[in-house]
Structures are given as structure tokens and as C-alpha cells.
Amino acid sequence: MGTARGHDGHVVTVEQVREVAQDLPKSEERLVRDRVTFRVGRLVYVAFTRDERSMGFGFPKEQRAALVAAEPAKFYLPRISDLRYNWVMAWLEPLSPTEMRELVTDAWAMCVSSRVRSAYFNRTALTREHPTC
């Protein structure tokens, strides 16, 4: 039995995450111990494994057990030393680009001020309502 792929048949990549993260205010990319990470200040909100097959991302601790239980082929708990953080892991192969965008954006939103978060979501809502094409 093969591993499921994202809804469009393609595996989410670091480059796709990078495209999402570069549009998020105050976000920056760093390479830490050969791993790509995205952060706001000192707070990391996404970090890839060295093999780039999965990523960890900010997620409320109190909701992570339900997330993992609901979709264990897609999500898993972080290593024991990271359980104290608001953090969960996801395999990239079964994620759709839409799911990835939501996970990355929500993780980023946990790291910024409410003012920055509101300004970003208001801007993106206006862009969706009034496209410039």
C-alpha cells in the first residue's frame, strides 16, 4: 500500500513553505544545524527535519493529541524533549498545499502580536475579495 500524496498529487516542499513564509510579516528563514527553520524573532514556528520529509510547526498543546489521533498518517507527536512546547509534526507527503498554507500561517500567527496578525489577515481578506487581476 503506497503513501497518500497531497490532494493535487504532489508532495509539499520546503520551497512551497518558503513561498508562504516570505509573505508573512516579521518572518525570517534560518538554517540551524542543517535544518531549514522559519521564525519570528527568536520564536521558531516551522522547522524541517534534515531529510525534509516532515516539518514541525507551532500548534496548541491542548489540541495536538486530537490532531494526531484524527490523522495519524499525517501528523505525529514531536520527540519527548519537545512535548513541553506548542509543537506538532507533519509528514509532507500527505499534506495538500492548502493544508500546508493553513498550518504554516496559523503557526506564524501564534508568534506575532495581535496587531501584526490582524493587519495581515485583514490585508489577505481584502485581497481575496478584490483581486487586482
Image (cartoon, rainbow, N blue to C red):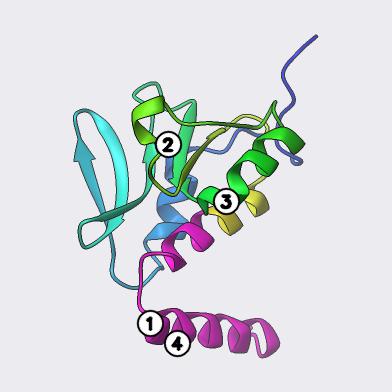
Which amino acid lies under the numbered mark 2 shown in the image of this protein?
Leu
> Which residue in the structure is indicated by mark 4?
119
Helix, strand or loop at mark 3: helix
Which residue is at 72% across, 18% downward? 3
- Whole-number angstrom distance, CA of label 4 to CA of label 2: 31 Å
Which residue is at 30% across, 38% downward? 36
Label 2 crowd (10 A; few <14 / some 14-19 / many >=20): few
- Whole-number angstrom distance, CA of label 2 to CA of label 3: 11 Å
Helix, strand or loop at mark 1: helix
Residue numbers of the magenta segment: 104-133
Give residue 56's position: percent from left, percent from top: 44, 39
* Left or right: 85 as drawn, with respect to 59: left
Quarter of image, res 21? bottom left
* Left or right: 104 as drawn, with respect to 84: right
Quarter of image, res 83? top left
Which amino acid lies under the numbered mark 1 shown in the image of this protein?
Val
Which amino acid lies under the numbered mark 3 shown in the image of this protein?
Glu
Give residue 60's position: percent from left, percent from top: 52, 54
Helix, strand or loop at mark 2: loop
Judge depth for marks 1 and 3 and give the one in front: 3
Q: Earlier in the sequence, mark 2 or mark 1?
A: 2
Which amino acid lies under the numbered mark 4 shown in the image of this protein?
Ala
Question: Where residue 105 is drawn, which disc sits there?
Answer: none
Residue 89 against residue 97 in the figure, above or below: above
Discs 4, 1 touching: Cβ within 8 Å: yes
Q: Earlier in the sequence, mark 2 or mark 3?
A: 3
* Left or right: 104 as drawn, with respect to 80: right
Question: Where residue 83 is drawn, which disc sits there?
Answer: 2
Helix, strand or loop at mark 4: helix
> Which residue in the structure is indicated by mark 1?
116
- Whole-number angstrom distance, CA of label 3 to CA of label 4: 27 Å
- Whole-number angstrom distance, CA of label 2 to CA of label 1: 27 Å
